[in-house]
Every structure is written in structure tokens, then in C-alpha cells.
Image (tube, rainbow, N blue to C red):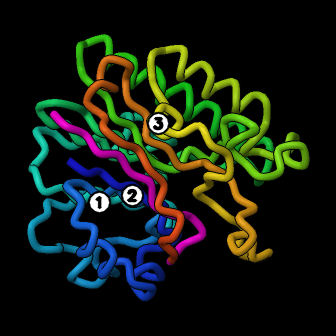
Amino acid sequence: MKILSWNVNGIRAASRKGLYEWFKKESPDILCLQEIKAIPEQVPLYLRNPPGYHVFWNPATRKGYSGVVTYTREKPMTVKKGFGIEKFDQEGRILITEFPSFTLFNIYYPNGKKNQERLDYKLDFYDTFLGYVDNLKTAGKNIIVCGDFNTAHKEIDLARPRENEKISGFLPVERAWIDTFIDHGYIDTFRYFHKEPGQYTWWDMKTRARERNIGWRIDYFFVNREFIQYVKNAFIMQDVTGSDHCPVGIEIDI
């Protein structure tokens, strides 16, 4: 089973850059997209309702902002669009789909660079998410979490760590939260299989950083420790263009 995740930085823009052709070629069992910046009615029919997939949208209340969508071949048992907290749910950042073997979180985590208020919002979102996912894990559910976390965890996860120590996305408090998340029993699947540097998922397009691979690894797949035995591979698709992020994925055998 192949599950892919991609922050497309606008599904309409990505569509014009070959998103659907890539989607058909990869033919994943599940595809999670973040930062779609659209409602379904604004999206071409072939992406709104592609053959062979159940599609679940959670756009933001604000137009042209945030939003996530999950495409899945298998119909989920349940679908939830948020944590049940208005200040988070209105931004369209969360889709939770439950399957017999696991519960999948497709999440576009907030960016904290704008100001202190947004950083506080991001950290509050992190803590709310952790409480929510821990409750499911305690109840015996297996967990897969994918999406744009908007934080690079370790120095190996960005090209220029020293220059970014005081920038949101690599602040000690943000990195410490990922440490806490891992301490709660979750595994970064990519680092489980790959220890090498130079593996990134986001590049600043204004400075043409992608051409020089001056990037950040901020897109992840995490699973609970008990589920890692079913994960056979984790990967970054750095050659796929169409966004300032590239897709990431896992293969599982259950």
C-alpha cells in the first residue's frame, strides 16, 4: 500500500503544472494534499472527483487559504474535519480518516513566521494535536500522520541550520515539540530508513534554492511505534516539481 503526501501550494496552480498526470502515474492507494487554497467547485473535475477514489475536502473558511484534501481508493470507516475546536477547524488544516488497520491524519500545520501571535497559535495547535492523537493511540488505534509540519527537526534537516536558529521553523521551542512528539511513541519514518543529509522537502523559490538544494525537510510521515513493523519504506520525491514542496511517501504492508 502506497501513501503519498504533498503540500501543493495551491491545487489549481499545481494542476497547471502536471499534478493530475503525476497522480495518475503514481497511482497511490491514498494521496494527501495540503495548502490547496481552493474549494472543490474551483478545481477541475478530474481532480475534484478522479475515477477510482473517494475524495474528502476540508477547505478553509477564508478564500484562497490553507485547506487539505484526501484521495483514497478504500472508503474510510469515518471521516473527521478537525479537532472540534473552532479556532483551528476554521482554517481547514485537518482531515482524519479511519480505516480498519490505522487512522490517518492529513494535516497542514500552521506557519509561525508572521508574528508572535501566529507562533503561539502554531504551538497551541501542536499541543492540541498531540492530545488528540494520544487519546486515539491510548484507545488502541494505530496512527499514521502526514503533512507539512512547518518545522525542521534536527540540523541534518536543513541546509543552513546556524543561519536559521532564530527563525520560526527551526526555533528551539518548535524542535523541542517534535522531540516531545517522538517521546510520546511516534517514529519519523524517513529517518527510520534514511540517515543521510541533504534530503529536503521545501525550498525557497524566490532565491532559486532548489537548484542548489538549499532546503528544509519539513514534510513528514510519522507512525506510532507499534505500527513501524508494517512500514516497508519511506521516501522523498525530490525530482517532482510543481510546488515549492516535493511529495513524500511511505509503503506499508498490512
Q: Which residue is drawn at the image coordinates 54% and 14% (left, top)?
A: 183
Label 2 amino acid?
Val
Residue at disc 1, secondary structure: strand
**Residue picked out by circle 2:** 68
Residue at disc 3, secondary structure: helix
> Can see residue 49?
yes
Does residue 234 lie above or below 30 as drawn?
above
Q: Residues within 10 Å of mark 1 (few under 14, many from 20)?
A: many
Is residue 172 found inside the magenta-colored segment of the image? no
Q: Are marks 2 and 3 in contact (CB under 8 Å)?
A: no
Describe residue 70's horizontal placement relative to residue 99 as left or right: right
Residue 57: numbered disc: 1
> Can see residue 64?
no
Q: Earlier in the sequence, mark 1 or mark 3?
A: 1
Q: Which residue is drawn at the image coordinates 34% and 26% (left, top)?
A: 228
Q: Are marks 2 and 1 in contact (CB under 8 Å)?
A: yes
Residue numbers of the magenta segment: 242-254
